[in-house]
């Protein structure tokens, strides 16, 4: 493990995926290029390659998930790994077993890769510090900190539809404050050379200290999405709001909800993305989610290939 960046070994190779922050551009591009090769596997009649044959992937989702958990399971299966989904609600976590004891016991069952979603920011880092050198950890979303595979599948989607990041304007709209997706997207976009990244939302939901990340903060939707190529709408994360940050979902929609009329402020061929799950009629109207500019479902599909790429790459590198 590299002391400065725990995701990399001493040769600078990816051994864990914990965050898009601090990942060099060549590693991000290697993941996207590898994912591109795996997309064709997903189109085959027999959707399997033997890359992870004999390896054991443990999915540990301490928070709910539909897209991430399922696509990790599909990705690992298509790489020929054995996949184990720990049912957290029925596990001994409910009896008070600690996270690290759980990891130690699953490691004793010969785990090779842990895919971890946890409400506590930093939980996957903690695990990565305690596993044996041959074991790899992938962050599937930790608190409001990071969701790196969502960030990578978003980059894959943007590159697929829009090409070179260095010509693009990307607006990230909504509840940036609580969004691990926003943070992962921002780090990936700026590393990949996107010259115009905007974060857009009400003052209560957009941190004021984002300028150092190389993004522009806008509190007006019209200004924020004007002439942009990509609009990424974020879910209002009510489960992470401790106080009354918003008067109501309706009020948010009135000022920042993406409607067909407002989408015309962006470029005519702008794509609309959303990590899901979508609050229809709050951050985005159904007619936009289901409309011609939406790439929300292709995002999900690309997530399989991106997660195959991440698992394939880290499993091939030694600590
Ligand atoms: N985008 C995302 O993380 O969705 P899930 O919570 O369903 O995994």
Image: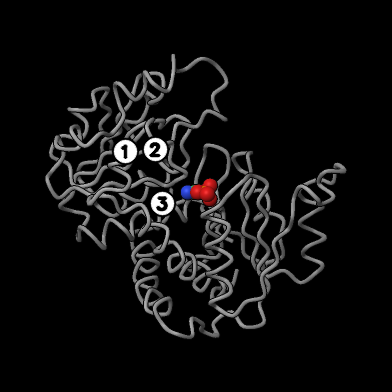
What residue sits right under mark 1 in the picture? Answer: 172
What residue sits right under mark 3 in the picture? Answer: 151
Q: CA distance from mark 3 to mark 1?
A: 12 Å
> In the picture, residue 284 is in which quadrant?
top left
Choose between 260 and 231: the one closer to the eye. Answer: 260
> In the picture, residue 120 is in which quadrant?
top right
What residue sits right under mark 2 in the picture? Answer: 234
- Residue that sits furthest to the right in the current view: 95
Residue 134 visible, this orientation? no
Q: Nearer the viewer, mark 3 or mark 2?
A: 2
Q: Nearer the viewer, mark 1 or mark 2?
A: 2
Please report contact status of discs 1 and 2: CB closer than 8 Å, yes or no.
yes
Please report contact status of discs 3 and 1: CB closer than 8 Å, yes or no.
no
Residue placed at 39% from the left, 58% from the top? 153
Q: CA distance from mark 3 to mark 2?
A: 12 Å
Left or right: 167, with 242 as reference point: left
Under tag 2, what secondary structure? loop
Give the mark nearest the N terminus, 3 or 1. Answer: 3
Q: CA distance from mark 1 to mark 2?
A: 7 Å
Give the mark nearest the N terminus, 3 or 2. Answer: 3
Q: Quadrant of the N terminus?
A: bottom right
Left or right: 78, with 215 as reference point: right
Position of residue 4 measured from the top left corner of the image (x, y, whole percent): 52, 52
């Amino acid at each position: 493990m590299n002391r400065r960046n725990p995701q990399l070994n001493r040769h600078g190779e990816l051994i864990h995926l914990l965050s898009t922050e601090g990942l060099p551009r060549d590693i991000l591009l290697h993941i996207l290029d590898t994912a591109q090769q795996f997309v064709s596997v997903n189109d085959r009649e027999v959707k399997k390659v033997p890359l992870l044959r004999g390896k054991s992937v443990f999915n540990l989702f301490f928070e709910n998930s539909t897209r991430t958990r399922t696509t990790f399971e599909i990705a690992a299966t298509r790489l020929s790994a054995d996949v184990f989904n720990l049912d957290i609600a029925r596990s001994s976590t409910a009896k008070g077993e600690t996270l690290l004891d759980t990891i130690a016991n699953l490691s004793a069952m010969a785990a090779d890769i842990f895919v971890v979603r946890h409400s506590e920011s930093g939980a996957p880092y903690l695990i990565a510090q305690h596993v044996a050198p041959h074991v790899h950890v992938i962050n599937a979303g930790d608190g409001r900190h990071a969701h790196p595979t969502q960030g990578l599948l978003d980059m894959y989607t943007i590159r697929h539809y829009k090409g070179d990041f260095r010509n693009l304007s990307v607006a990230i709209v909504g509840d940036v404050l609580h969004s691990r997706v926003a943070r992962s997207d921002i780090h990936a976009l700026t590393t990949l050379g996107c010259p115009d990244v905007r974060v857009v939302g009400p003052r209560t939901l957009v941190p004021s200290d984002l300028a150092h990340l190389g993004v522009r903060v806008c509190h007006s939707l019209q200004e924020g999405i004007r002439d942009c190529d990509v609009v990424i709408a974020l879910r209002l994360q009510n489960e992470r709001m401790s106080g009354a940050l918003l008067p109501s979902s309706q009020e948010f929609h009135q000022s920042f909800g993406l409607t067909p009329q407002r989408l015309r402020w962006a470029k005519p061929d702008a794509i609309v993305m959303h990590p899901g799950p979508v609050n229809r009629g709050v951050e985005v109207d159904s007619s936009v989610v289901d409309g011609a500019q939406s790439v929300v479902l292709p995002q999900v599909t690309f997530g399989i290939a991106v997660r195959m790429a991440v698992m394939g790459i880290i499993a091939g590198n030694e600590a």
